[in-house]
Image (cartoon, rainbow, N blue to C red):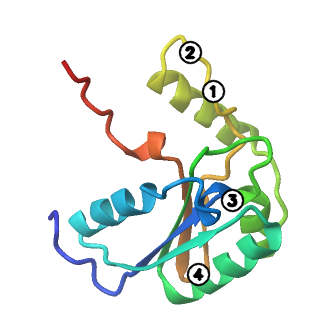
Amino acid sequence: MAGERVQFMRAEIVAIGSELVSGQGLDTNSQWLSRALEAHGIPVAFHTTIGDQLDDHVSTFRIAAGRAELVIMTGGLGPTQDDLTREALAATAQVSLREDPGSLEAIRRMFAGANPGRPDPRGAGRDCRGFVTGRSRLARSHPDDVRPAEPADG
């Protein structure tokens, strides 16, 4: 039921990007995600903003996973070739990265269905979408993946 609180679950949103901590960009993703989670009964307990440094990512993810059951990472540009999210999540969970051909193909099919006739501009398979570590669920989101399309004016 929408709006009903999920028992024993708190969320943390981690906004990632040097443009956010420098003040060159505005983090509207965290606001939107907080409202969406609250509408589904998941209270957001923390917002954290970090730059593009691997050590900062790892320490932040460890802290967040220790105090929230759901951790969502979001960034301004989404998965780019210099995105550190995959490496930081792997270091946080103390696992090595490996490419799974079946998962990669499923991601390619998902993006092909979302954008028929257009290749995934972000590079399918580049992003680590999320995983479970201990009691926390960690997920990486890009606003285009979760926000409904804005209606055109006019």
Q: Circle 2 sits on which residue?
A: 118
Residue at (79, 66) in percent of width and height: 53
Q: Nearer the viewer, mark 4 or mark 1?
A: 1
Q: Nearer the viewer, residue 82 or 6?
A: 82
| Residue 93 can be seen, yes or no | no
Q: Amino acid at mark 2?
A: Arg
| Residue 69 can be seen, yes or no | yes
Sequence-wise, which precedes: disc 3 or disc 2?
3
Q: Amino acid at mark 1?
A: Pro
Disc 4 from disc 2: Cα separation: 36 Å
- Where does residue 132 sit, x and y in percent of width and height? 59, 70
Looking at the rendered structure, the secondary structure element under dot 1 is: loop
Query: Callout 3 environment at 10 Å: few (<14), some (14 to 19), or many (20+)?
Result: some
Query: Callout 1 environment at 10 Å: few (<14), some (14 to 19), or many (20+)?
Result: few
Q: Quick check: 81 above or below 64?
A: above
User: Residue 18 shows which numbered tag?
Assistant: 3
Residue contact at pointers 1 and 2, CB within 8 angstroms: yes
- Which quarter of the image is occupied by the N terminus? bottom left
Q: Circle 1 sits on which residue?
A: 121
Residue contact at pointers 3 and 2, CB within 8 angstroms: no
- How many numbered marks are there? 4
Sequence-wise, which precedes: disc 1 or disc 3?
3
Q: Circle 4 sits on which residue?
A: 65
Disc 1 from disc 2: Cα separation: 8 Å
